Image (cartoon, grey):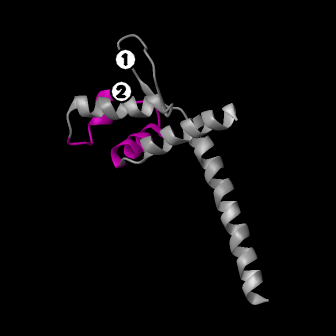
Amino acid sequence: MVQQLTSSVHLNATFAALAHPTRRAILTRLASGDSSVSELAEPFEMSMPAISKHLKVLQRAGLIERGREAQWRPCRLAAGPLKDASDWLSIIAASGRKRSIASRTICAS
């Protein structure tokens, strides 16, 4: 029960973070490699504080990690929560397919 609740909280945080197109674009950028905050901010017409807020949401959801290498503070993708969300979606999709097949079988009878 506790594990299920923890899993639910993590999934909620992941999907809430993924709900915004800017955050999805940041994750897409990070999928090709580590980037600094200023590099991540380049394509967006928004302030650095706004980008920082998006990064904090992603970090709280566990979707990114922020490191420190001398003067460079790279952001990197953390794929674990994305895999958890993908696994959950696969379970739901499989359940939906089973129900769809079952209802077509019943209707065909």
Q: Which residue is mark 1?
A: 72
Relative horizontal placement of residue 54, taking residue 6 as reference (left or right): left
Count the marks: how many?
A: 2
Relative height, residue 12 to residue 101 (above, below) = above
Mark 1 Cα-neighbour bin, 10 Å: few <14, some 14–19, many ≥20: few
Three-letter amino acid code of the residue under disc 1: Trp
Q: What is the x, y in percent for residue 12?
A: 51, 41
The part of the image, by quadrant, that contains residue 99 is: bottom right
Instruction: Name the chief secondary structure element in magenta.
Output: helix
Whether residues under marks 1 and 2 lie with C-beta atoms below 8 angstroms apart, the answer is: yes
Residue 11: tell me if it is visible: yes
The part of the image, by quadrant, that contains residue 107 is: bottom right
Secondary structure of the residue carrying numbered label 2 = loop
Q: What is the x, y in percent for residue 95?
A: 70, 62
Q: Which residue is mark 2?
A: 36
Of the image marks 1 and 2, the number of the one nearer the N terminus: 2
Please, which residue is most extreme toward the bottom here?
Answer: 109
Q: What is the x, y in percent for residue 77?
A: 49, 33
Residue 79: tell me if it is visible: no
Relative horizontal placement of residue 45, taking residue 5 as reference (left or right): left
Q: Is residue 41 magenta?
A: yes
Please, which residue is most extreme toward the top here?
Answer: 70
Depth order, front residue of 52/88? 88
- Quarter of the figure that contains the C terminus: bottom right
Three-letter amino acid code of the residue under disc 2: Ser
Residue occupying the point 33% across, 28% down: 37
The boundaries of the magenta stretch are: 21-45
Q: Which mark is residue 108?
A: none
Residue occupying the point 61% across, 48% down: 86
Relative height, residue 54 to residue 107 (above, below) = above
Secondary structure of the residue carrying numbered label 1 = loop
